[in-house]
Image: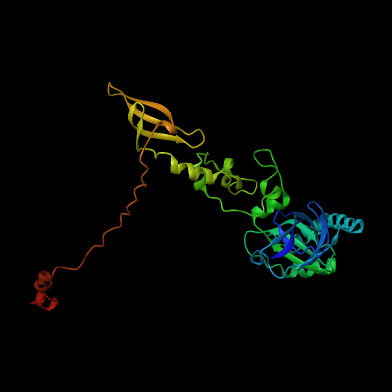
Amino acid sequence: MKTVVGVQFYKSNKVYYFSPNQIACKVGDDVVVETARGAEIARVAQGPMDVDDEKIVSPLKNVVRLVTPKDRAQQEKNRAQEADALKIFEKKIAEHKLEMKPVSVEYGFDGSNITFFFTADGRVDFRELVKDLAHQFRTRIELRQIGVRDEAKLLGGLGKCGCPVCCQRFLPEFSPVSIKMAKEQNISLNPTKISGLCGRLMCCLNYEQPYYEEMRKKLPRNGSNVKTPDGIGVAMESNPISLLIKVRIQKPDETFEIREYKLDEISFERTKPPKKQENKPKKQNNKPPEGEKKRRKSPQNDKS
């Protein structure tokens, strides 16, 4: 067990563990920490606590100090320089005629390195660009290619709900999202309605998925027989939110009617869906029967 504090870096929601190094820091404090890239400013998200060694990534770095007014001034200076560096980055890309889109620039706290973020359709040979930027800024340069989801996280914006995008606001990392989730939640499959700013499926489709998966286990399958207060019927549609089931009931005059029932008003036997049988094409046996082989004549016999 080790005593650690959890911190979050600029434009990142992921929590990293650092040793408090006997410095009294609480949630919300800005601190200077040691990283592989040098000193960085971070915000304390989790106060001092004991954590198992298995959950700590070695080596455990230290908190150097609480942020001072001088550190704050340096941080503001870096933010102002980042805007100018992005313009230079765009200019240099155009000069080298590279097919890449600049996204953001991040200065190291102590100015020992600058990271340039960009997107591109494929791999880009930017070795000459790095040399040019290193000559321009006189410091260590790092170019990092990111995906469209990371681009949306860095730039931010408003989602379809009107709130700031989740990836920038609170998501520590991206979770896999599939079109199957939209189908199970009965959401329109129109790409413009289920895609986020990044053009990928919205991350929020994943939030309610565990609930839908759990409720699907408790609801009857469409087409299965259910027992209702009005007799045996066939389940036509189930709503996981309202827990209402539409059932087709046969009336005494042999006509059918769709009625709604609450989940606790019906009973049914939950069965596994039938497995789809793959129709594999049968292999055709082109070999002639044994008797036909013997009856065949050789070309020499045909000539005679």
User: Residue at 73% of width from left, 50% of height from top?
Assistant: 155
Query: Residue 14 appears in which quarter of the rendering?
Result: bottom right
User: Residue at 76% of width from left, 63% of height from top?
Assistant: 115
**Image coords of residue 144 (percent x, y):** 70, 63
**Image coords of residue 36 (percent x, y):** 75, 68
Q: Is residue 86 left or right of residue 56?
A: right
Q: How many marks?
A: 0
**Image coords of residue 112 (percent x, y):** 83, 67
Q: Is residue 186 left or right of residue 125?
A: left
- Foreground: 74 or 136? 74
- Foreground: 146 or 270? 270
User: Residue at 68% of width from left, 45% of height from top?
Assistant: 165
| Position above or below: 35 against 173 | below
Q: Quadrant of the C terminus?
A: bottom left
Q: Residue furthest bottom?
A: 300
Q: Quadrant of the N terminus?
A: bottom right
Q: Is residue 215 visible?
A: yes
**Image coords of residue 202 (percent x, y):** 60, 46
Q: Residue furthest right?
A: 70
Q: Residue furthest top?
A: 253
- Foreground: 90 or 243? 243
Q: Is residue 243 left or right of residue 149?
A: left
